[in-house]
Structure formats: structure tokens, C-alpha cells
Amino acid sequence: MKSYYVELTDIGRSHLNQEEIDVSDLKENEALIEAEYSMISAGTELSRAFGLKKGFRYPVRPGYCMVGKLLAKGSGIDIEPGERAYVNAPHASLVRWKHTGKVQDAMILKLPRDLDPKEATVINLLLVAIQGVNLCDVKLGYRLAVLGLGNIGIFTALMFKKLGCEVTGVDPIGKRRELATSMGISKVSEDLKDEEFDIVVDATGLSEVINNSVKHLKAYGQLLLLGSPRQSYECDMTPFLSAIHMKNIIVRGAFNNTAPFAPVEGSDNSLLRNYRVVCDLLRNKDIDVSKMIDRVIDPKDCEEAYYDLMYNKDKATCILYDWHNYQNR
């Protein structure tokens, strides 16, 4: 069967390509999935689209946030043909994907029937956010700042608010501050001025922002590194390290999905638990993703979408690909 897929061909260049997919003899834990919608990641994916990470090579197939329907499956998949699934597969109209049961590998998870397939494309970003939230020692009434109000930053801020924190969202881009406010973050700012917090969350991945963040932490505060630093930055590290040392600051890395896939004895932190929780957050409109989606586009317009997300951040925050026109071609 024919599949259409987004391909990054060089820095800032992408197009829609096609290939034939072998749909016969599905192996254990394999599934054939027809995509409905997939979401562009404005973090990892953009870093690949514009070569922000050194040593990156082209061509490459980007994406890891897809919702689609199962057409067929091998043994070991507990989702029936015709049912929807969340899949962390690249942007493509048709994929043959294997469920590994590992948190840093391929996942196929049954999507609850009452979730909107467009909104469910953000699930992987919600899993990134909840991973960081679960790592922190949080107490009711803690004052907390989230630096960077992109998708993950807003999700993280809303989760901490649900835990009873007094949250301040920080971003220099007005559209993002307005969006955060509309979604329930009542206090937003362009910068932190001279305020101090119990927890500071970096959701930018910008080393300069991280370097300056420690001066806004109280003694015994926590710094959560949720964004992935990718670009080089030169500075004198002594003030940063001295602040950590003198104020007894705890620095926590929050790389995506380091919890075990399934629950293990002695811990209730697992990807399956987090998946259930974030699905509930979507279902209950605790996080109303419908307010975040800027537009749903034809995948052939991928290059324009990447450009807007990279350079027109005051206009574009969340863009989805609609694959319906490429099904059964």
C-alpha cells in the first residue's frame, strides 16, 4: 500500500514524499495504522528542521505525535482493527509500527473513544510535561515560575496549578502569554524581574535562560530542566554554580519518559499511569487543547508550517497535519 510522509531534506527544507508499505505478515506487536492527524513538535522537531543540533544529518523523517486507526495487527496488540490509537510515529499517512513496551521507543496505545483525535495528538507533549511535574517535590501553595509558554510550558504550568501551586508563566511573546491566560494561567509576565520562587521550570531549552534562572530561586529551591538545551552558549559558569552551592538548590533533569513503561513494585510512576492521567486531563477539559491549535493543514504545506513555527512565533504555536486526503490512495 502507498504511504505519503513528510521528509526533511536540508536545513529549512521539507516536502511530502511517498513509498510503498509492505502490509503482509504482521509480526508480534506490529500494527498497520492509517493516520488521521499528527502534530508538529515545536521543540525537538523544529531543532531537526533547522539544524539546531550539531551533527544532524539529512534526509530524515520527523514527528512523533500521531493519532490514527488500526487497519490490521499482529498478535500482542490489544487494540482491535477500526479502533483509534495514539502512536509516536513519524508524520505519514500509513505506518507499519511495532509496539516495544519501552518508554524511549515505539508506542501504540489505545485511545479512549471519548477523546477528540485532533486534541489527542498532543499526548506525547503532555507526557513530557507530567514526567517533569512528577519529579518535583511539590507542596500546596508553592510559588512556581515556568519559563517559556510554548505547548509544553503551558501544559506544565496547568499541571502545577492543579497541584495547588501559585504559578507565574513567563514568555516574551505576547501571543503565548495571551494563550496561557485564556487556558487558566492568571499570572503571566515578560520576565521575572526580582521575584523569587520555590520552583523554577525551564521549558525553553535555552542555556542563557537556564543560566539566569537560579537568581530567581529561594534557598532550598528546585530548578527543573524540562527543555532540551541544543545550541552552544558561552559564559562564566561560576555565578550559576555558586548560586546552586550557596542556596542549596536542587537541579533536576527531566528528559522525556524515563519512568518505566508499566508500574513496578514500590512505585506508581509509570508511562501507562501517566497516559491514563493525561487522557483524563483532556477528557475533563482541565487542559483545553482546542484553544491551542492554530490550524490544521495539508501535509504538502509542511515547509511553510515549519517556517511559521520557527520564525512567526507570535502567529503559530500548534499546527496539525490532516491525513484524510491521503488515505487509501
Image (cartoon, rainbow, N blue to C red):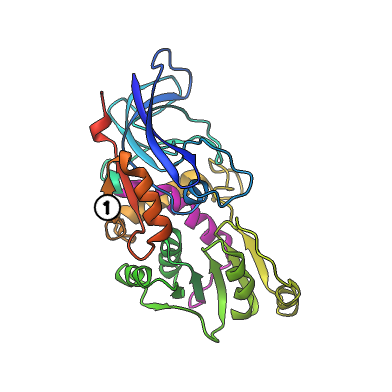
With respect to residue 176, does 255 lie above or below? above
With respect to residue 2, does 155 lie above or below? below
The foreground one among 156 and 265 is 156
Q: Position of residue 302 (x, y in %)?
A: 36, 43
**Magenta highlight range:** 119-143
Q: Which residue is mark 1?
A: 295
Left or right of residue 289: residue 276? right
Residue at 37%, 68% (x, y): give it. Answer: 176
The N terminus appears in which quarter of the rendering?
top left
The foreground one among 324 and 144 is 324
Left or right of residue 150: residue 297? left
Q: Quadrant of residue 24?
A: top left
Q: Residues within 10 Å of mark 1 (few under 14, many from 20)?
A: few
32 inside magenta stretch:
no
Q: Position of residue 60 (x, y in %)?
A: 50, 36
Q: Position of residue 263 (x, y in %)?
A: 54, 43
Left or right of residue 175: residue 141? right
Give the residue furthest to the top.
25
Could you say whether the residue bearing mark 1 is in a helix, strand or loop? strand
